[in-house]
Image: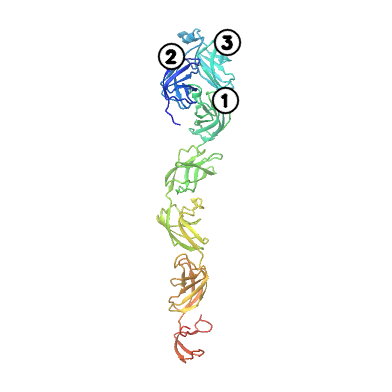
Amino acid sequence: PYYTQPYPVSLDPDSAGSQGGARITVHGTGFMDVDTLACKVGTIGPILAKFLDENSITCVMPARRPSPRGDPQIGSYPLEVSLNAVDYSDLNLTTVSYFNEGPDAADFEKNMTIEEALGLVDGYTYVLDVRVPTGPVTGGTVSTIEGANFYEPQTTCRFQTTQSPGIIVNKFRLMCITPPHQAGFAAYEIITGATITTFGFQFHFHARAFVTLLEPDVGSTRGGEVVFVNGKNFLRSAEIGETPDRVGTFCALGTTSVEPGFFVSSALVKCETTNHVEEADLALEVTLNRLDLTNSKRLYRVRNDPGFAFAAPYRAPAAGGTAVTVSGGPFREGTFLGCRFGTIGPVPAVMLDSGEAVCVTPSHVPQAVPLFATLNGKDLSQLPIRFHFRTPPVVESVFPEQGVTRGGARITVVGSYLEQGEQAYCRVGAQLVATDTVSPNVMACVSPPAPPGFVKVGVADGAEDGNVAGKEHQGAWFHYQAPAVTLAAHPPVGDVGGGALVRVIGNELISLEPGGLLCHFGGDAPSTARVLSSALATCESGAHREGAVALELSASGPVSGFNSAVFEFAKTPFPAALFPTAGPTEGGAVVEATTAGADAYAPGSSPGGASAQFGTV
């Protein structure tokens, strides 16, 4: 649930002893009786608090360094309150002042003469600062103490109840080697002879940190790249004191200087790489005190920054899916080589050699974008090249809408943004057909062979457009029709004046368009056939000079079929005289007819010669 942030207003009392343990009442607003009610003193917390009422709680003060000689800048720490032990009030309205308590309290408060401070004369031992206040529980950390009057040969260091020999560097510096110790804060004092100091310093023993994984594990020699370091037992400075410049989680790449890391959690810290002159495989280790490095031996590969010089093609459809060959380098095996198009990516690249790779474009809004190279999937090259995503074509219609399966039909495509690449291509189903006839709104191409059925006709860049399969749905419908096959015609002869009704037998004599089945008498203009079935249609002959012609049917516009029948145009004889001119109703009379105007036995006529019709018989 959401809650109002609590704020402390005053403390009672507002001071505590350096050994810790004092209970202070905190007065303020917004306090709630929850299990995670906590205080934080300086950087030490959370410290569980006791709820009194919505305006009062109590907290037990931890041990902290006191204020020497009444200096409020050193021994005063802000007290903050949290309801979830994570998010604290940050107004710093309440401050706890620590005072020294212990057997040498009088020495702690007394002033040091100039001669004593300069080490010219012996004085009391004074601890001013601990340079390394944290180390692993395994011990072995060299902790440096700065102060004055370190001269007693029997000087030792005490960590809570465990003693360790002290090494006097000079009168102002002492080195202590930490012993193995359980995790947590330990009182850190000096024993000089029979005297034990009580200046309130603490040493933090923590679990030894180690690194398990680097993401990414390769980067550029120019540095400045962020590495996600996975591991265990990482600490933030708030957990180990008020000196973030000395304690925290730091990163060391190879033999370079130790640099601060960005603490994320106890299992993750972010490190920034530094500049390197040449390529190398370096161990990336962490330290919590700038001194004790992990020994995980996780290698970070430093490589020269790759770059792109040019791309082919340098333009592609906004729908994506185009295979782009990028040239440049140096490209190396074992790296996550990739391309980033504007703000999209990086997409993986397939390395062809040290100077060429292939990336497949993602979908993108139509515009020009920078194309970056990356060797680890995160950090980008500094010098991109330009890449242009074009507005996708819009196909509104195609004409004609059908053609025969053997191809060859000239198709006109009408739409918008049809000029897509250097070489224009029609996409007919899953096939690409090159064409030189293109404008922004009209494109013409010839249909390729294809099996019978419906396909979509669209526009593509060409073979470099990438994966053709799966894009057949883009465009307008086009029907592939099996060609009409003409087998026979009856009657096989007709008058030169036309008007003969000819029955045509064949296969595939159908058309999806009304009036789409056409009759072709030689080279005459085609006429519309009447479809009776897929195997039978009728055609009416037009006027034509004498002679035999090929009669064929087509079911896809002016394109003719594979086979044809022979039809002959001839002059039709007409009767000039009859003898006798009458006969019995029973029939059987032999009538002699005298014809005129044509040969009764014209080539192509039936073997019996000409025939006569009496009325309707």
**Badge 2: few (under 14), some or many (20 or more) residues near its Cα, within 10 Å?**
few
CA separation in Å, label 1 and label 3: 31 Å
**Badge 1: few (under 14), some or many (20 or more) residues near its Cα, within 10 Å?**
some
- The numbered mark, 2 or 3, whose residue comes first in the sequence reads 2
Say which amino acid is labelled 3.
Answer: Gln
CA separation in Å, label 1 and label 2: 36 Å
142 left or right of 54?
A: right
- The numbered mark, 1 or 2, whose residue comes first in the sequence reads 2
Q: Which residue is mark 3?
A: 154
Identified at 42% across, 45% down, the residue is: 368
Say which amino acid is labelled 2.
Answer: Asp
Mark number for residue 208? 1
Q: Which residue is mark 2?
A: 71
Q: Is residue 83 visible?
A: yes
Foreground: disc 2 or disc 3: 2
Q: Secondary structure at mark 3?
A: loop
Q: Is residue 301 visible?
A: no
Residue 13: x and y in percent read 44, 15
Q: Secondary structure at mark 2?
A: loop
| For the residues bearing labels 1 and 3, Cβ distance under 8 angstroms | no
Q: Of 533 and 474, which appears nearest the observer?
A: 533
CA separation in Å, label 2 and label 3: 31 Å
Quarter occupied by residue 525: bottom left
